[in-house]
Image (spheres, rainbow, N blue to C red):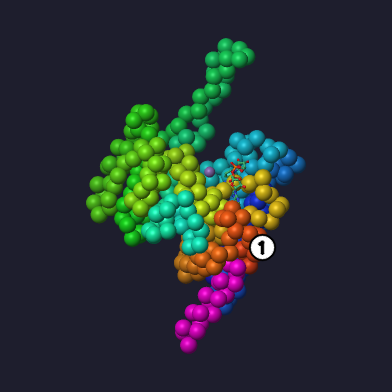
Amino acid sequence: ARIYRIASIPGDGIGREVIDAGLQVLRTVSELSNGEIAFEVTEFPWSSHYYLEHGHYVPEGGLEQLAEHDAIYFGAVGGPEVPDHVSLWGLRLAITQPFDQWANIRPVSFLPGVSSPLRKADTTELEWVVVRENSEGEYAGFGGRNLSGRGPGNEVAVQTSLHTEKGCERIIRFAFDLARTRPVTKVSSVTKSNAQQYGMVLWDEVFTRVAKDYPDVETESVLVDAMSAKFVLHPEQLSVVVASNLHADILSDLGSALAGSLGIAASANLNPDRRYPSMFEPVHGSAPDIVGQGIANPIGAVASAALMLEHLGEPAAARAVLAAIDATTGAGILPKDLGGVATTAQVTEALVSALREDQRASETEEV
Ligand code: NAD
Ligand code: MN
């Protein structure tokens, strides 16, 4: 059997609810593989509740424990009791940064049976992927407060973006390599280099230089404000969209909303060098407004598990999970955020049944 060691970190809020759904789907994948695929899941209880009790999210030696796994499956972090910048830096960024997960892949997938605010989505096959620079840029954590020393009421804060030539180059190359694997070989680069003349201009220059190595790939450079309009007005022109940390964070939420809801969007934090484990998580946060109601949409977490299977070298299992998602939404089994009435448990049950159905169908074909 091919055994994969998964570290699961449900985190806060609906993180637990959607990760449980994803693990149920993975157990089904294993069960249906006739012993070929197995998952050894270790859960790590690091959450905001844990932080309030222990004074930290990731304990000493925690990263070393994570490093022994083939992948990390992450829910969400952020709770009403802890300031958001503390929880984000305490858990999510405390993993993505030391594990050098510099590429964050966020597919925008339109599902059957889910209505999109884009009328075009009903007639056109829409699907694109946001490639987010995940190690520097606006989230480099550089800056300071009260630099002026002018006293109360006059505080000054600086939050600096850091862009390195190497950091730009590796994520842009990653985007071009990804484009070559897709039906439409095109990369759209996003900056705000008209207003931000240092880091964003460096990005533009690196993009132009790297593009020369990929003459077969179509390119465009679009300013982020124009790109947000393009997401809505001309999404059919998109294939791979590569952008800095902040811009891609915002654009991927927009993309998932266009596809129906934040609840369906998947994400992979990759360490492409494979020195460290990569981390897979839904795009959404801990959704404190719906926690405990049993209505969290598990599709984003399940689609993230599909990205994890792909990364682990199980593309057939990944395809089966994505097909199960299509079968579920296509059959009108939709949770509340997609306009339906299905609970988290009902959607998960439907995904599991669809996987089993798919297996039965392929067995019949073989006979
Ligand atoms: P959010 O994604 O948690 O929620 C935004 C809205 O979308 C809410 O109305 C929520 O109910 C809805 N929603 C999100 N996921 C859903 C799902 N699976 N099913 C149904 N509805 C869903 O974003 P927010 O409200 O801005 O942030 C809440 C907390 O999450 C904050 O503490 C924030 O810092 C944190 N956060 C964490 C991450 C992460 O861990 N990667 C990402 C974003 C936000
Ligand atoms: Mn985000």
Left or right of 324 in this view: 21: right
Residue at horizontal 67%, vertical 45%?
289
Q: Residue 133 location, x and y as percent?
A: 44, 43
Q: Nearer the viewer, residue 92 or 186?
A: 186
Q: Quadrant of residue 23?
A: bottom right
Residue 134 among those drawn in magenta: no
Residue at horizontal 35%, vertical 43%?
189
Q: Nearer the viewer, residue 154 or 173?
A: 154
The residue range painted magenta reads 350-367
User: Against 256, is 93 above or below?
Assistant: above
Residue at horizontal 30%, vertical 37%?
205
Q: Nearer the viewer, residue 32 or 14?
A: 14
Q: Residue 225 location, x and y as percent?
A: 40, 37
Q: Residue 73 location, x and y as percent?
A: 58, 55
Direction top: furthest residue: 150
Q: Amino acid at mark 1?
A: Ala
User: Against 10, is 33 above or below?
Assistant: below
Residue at horizontal 63%, vertical 47%?
286
Badge 1 marks a residue whose secondary structure is helix
The residue identified by callout 1 is 345
